[in-house]
Amino acid sequence: MAPDRERKLWWLSLLSLPVLVAAAFGINAWRNIEEYLRRSESEIVTGTDAGSLDYAGALWRLEKVRLIGDGRDTATRFPGDMRLVVVRLVATAHDDIGERWNQCQVSLSDDTGRRWQPLDVTLSNDISRDLEPKVDPVKGCGITSLAPPKRNSAVMIEEKFVVPADAASKLAVRLSFASSRPKMISLPLGL
Amino acid sequence: MRIVFLIIMIVLSTVVLATLQATTPPYAMLTGPIMTDGRQGETVAATTFSAQIKQVQKAKTLAWDQFGRAVERQSSGTWVIVSAELQAMRETMPVRGATIIGMSGRLYHQSQRAQAAPNVLSAKTVQPGLPTTGIFIFEIPEEETRNMVLVLSRQYGPQLEDELHITLEQNGLVSRGRLEIGKNGP
């Protein structure tokens, strides 16, 4: 009796091995897929430059866009094709944000898929003080996401980008948070 | 008979496993960089960025101004200053990983002693559509300056990311005793 039971257990263990190995691979793969989706921005919700988009517990709209470097917005002229784009977005919370705005990603993209990341905080604040010396710099998305607005209140964020002149007319601002990815919103700048 | 069969099976299994083990590429190779080769003077382009080496100079002494104060760095070997133009293809990116493979095959990363010099490319961010020029500075033994290969990547030790291998021309190597680095490079 005992040897029979032992033999059954032995076969059961042997046969369960491939199942357990496959399950281990499957769980690991699922975790990696989840992590990939959390990082990627594959689902784009596009708005118009005048309208608002509902995303991550708030209504988002483009407040102001400035193109600096060609001598029109300010007297500043940048060498070659370099231009500075200043983007201001306003978000009005209609829900409790909590930690939904963690890991904010803002970028500009054009119709060919090229993406420009915002300038770092120090350089961005230095430029803000040069442009408007008597005004405190508007916070970027990363800092704002640490203290998001309460329900029914609004907040403005500002990001600055260095882009080539020929791309300026085709740019759209993209925004996403870890909790809402792979969904992201895209608002054309209309420059 | 059964023992002979068992021995044959064990030997066969050992051979199969040894073959599999010997022919399996190491993990570091499977997840290593995606290499693109080229030569100085031509635009060497990978999927995410490209580089063109404009000039390579050697000097015993480097000099630059830092916050209005003259800074000078001497070397018991030699300074190698590589002037380059970088372009990002898809998105904003730094090119922080720069290494020279010397004559002996040794790898030399950028010098920490000269990292405060102006116009150093590894301190810049490359924006798509905006070619960025600057320099990479290395401090290496004199005998290593023959047949150098410059290796560029987003950061040191890239995994499944682009890495450019650019052979530097021996004939185009300009040698100077002292090299002043201004805001726009040497």
Image: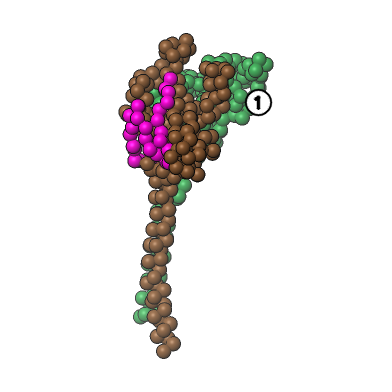
Chain colours: A brown, B green
Q: Nearer the viewer, residue A96 or A6?
A: A96
- In the picture, the quarter occupied by the C terminus of chain B is top right
Q: Residue at x 37, y 80 (%)?
A: B2
Residue stretch rendered in magenta on the structure: A40-66
Residue most extreme to the front: A152
Q: Residue at x 35, y 23 (%)?
A: A190
Does residue B32 show up? no
Q: Nearer the viewer, residue B82 or B158?
A: B158
Disc 1: CA contacts within 10 A as few (<14), some (14-19) or many (>=20): few
Q: Position of residue B89 (x, y in %)?
A: 38, 29
Task: Examine the structure image and report whether residue A55 is included in the region drawn in magenta.
Answer: yes
User: What is the total number of numbered labels drawn onto the structure image?
Assistant: 1
Q: Position of residue B146 (x, y in %)?
A: 52, 27
Name the residue beneath numbered marker 1.
B76
- In the picture, the quarter occupied by the N terminus of chain B is bottom left
Q: Residue at x 57, y 15 (%)?
A: B182
Q: Residue at x 49, y 32 (%)?
A: A155
> Which image quarter: residue A146?
top right
- Magenta span: helix, strand or loop, mainly? strand
> Which image quarter: residue B18?
bottom left
> Which image quarter: residue A114?
top left
Q: Position of residue A96 (x, y in %)?
A: 47, 43
Does residue A27 show up? yes
Task: Examine the structure image and report whether residue A166 is included in the region drawn in magenta.
Answer: no
Vertical comparison of A141 with B121: above or below = below
Q: Position of residue B48 (x, y in %)?
A: 40, 32
